[in-house]
Image (cartoon, rainbow, N blue to C red):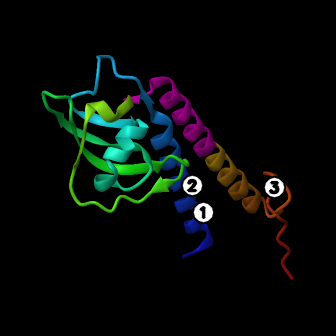
């Protein structure tokens, strides 16, 4: 891959990562208990972690994923996307299907929510990087057109005929 193309791919990837991470945050739900559906981060109690060991693995503190639903007893059916251990390490989920998280084992639930303020800040940062790249490209093109790579604009070089 050419260096310019590689740089362009890196800039686009960084912008996408910035927008994706800046636009959402985890906040407490507006209602009481586990929300009926949506993306959520579920923090387990020590007893809840021990009870969930057969489903998600040992010493899991946080389950992130999509809540499919909640039954009448408060048990949530969750499609697991990411796990975090009590040590703060990301753990690979080796299961295949959704897991059942009993309400009694949940210490806290946060819902993934669009953060409008951070989204505008991220969009401004991406726009700033884009404008900076365009201005830099235009300045380089203009200096090449002047015939003097160290000078911006100016007159073209003299052409002498023999």
Q: Reading the chain from its start, which is encountered first: label 1 or label 3?
A: 1
Magenta extent: 111-131
Q: Is residue 139 left or right of residue 19?
A: right
Q: In this rendering, is residue 114 above or below 137?
A: above
Tell me if 12 is positioned left or right of 37 in this view: right
Q: Which mark, by number, is residue 155?
A: 3
Q: Nearer the viewer, residue 80 or 100?
A: 100
Q: Quadrant of the N terminus?
A: bottom right
Residue 156 appearing in the image: yes
**Separation of residues labelled 2 and 1 (CA atoms):** 6 Å
Quadrant of the drawing holding the C terminus: bottom right
Most extreme residue toward the top is: 31
Of helix, strand and loop, which one carries label 3? loop
Instruction: Say if mark 2 contacts mark 1, CB within 8 Å.
Output: yes
Whole-angstrom CA distance, mark 1 to mark 3, is 31 Å
Residue holding disc 1: 7
- Front one among 103 and 22: 103
């Amino acid at each position: 891959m050419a260096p310019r193309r590689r740089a362009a791919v890196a800039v686009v990837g960084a912008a996408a990562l910035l927008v994706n991470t800046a636009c959402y945050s985890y906040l407490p739900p507006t209602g009481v208990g586990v929300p009926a559906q949506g993306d959520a981060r579920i923090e387990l109690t020590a007893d809840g972690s021990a009870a969930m060991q057969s489903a998600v693995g040992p010493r899991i503190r946080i389950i992130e994923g999509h809540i499919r639903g909640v039954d009448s007893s408060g048990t949530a059916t969750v499609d697991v996307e990411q796990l975090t251990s009590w040590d703060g390490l990301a753990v690979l989920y080796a299961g295949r299907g959704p897991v059942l998280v009993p309400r009694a084992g949940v210490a806290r639930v946060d819902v993934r929510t669009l953060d409008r303020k951070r989204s505008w800040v991220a969009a401004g940062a991406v726009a700033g990087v884009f404008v900076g790249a365009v201005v830099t490209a235009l300045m380089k093109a203009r200096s090449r057109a002047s015939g003097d790579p160290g000078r911006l604009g100016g007159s073209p070089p003299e052409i002498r005929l023999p």
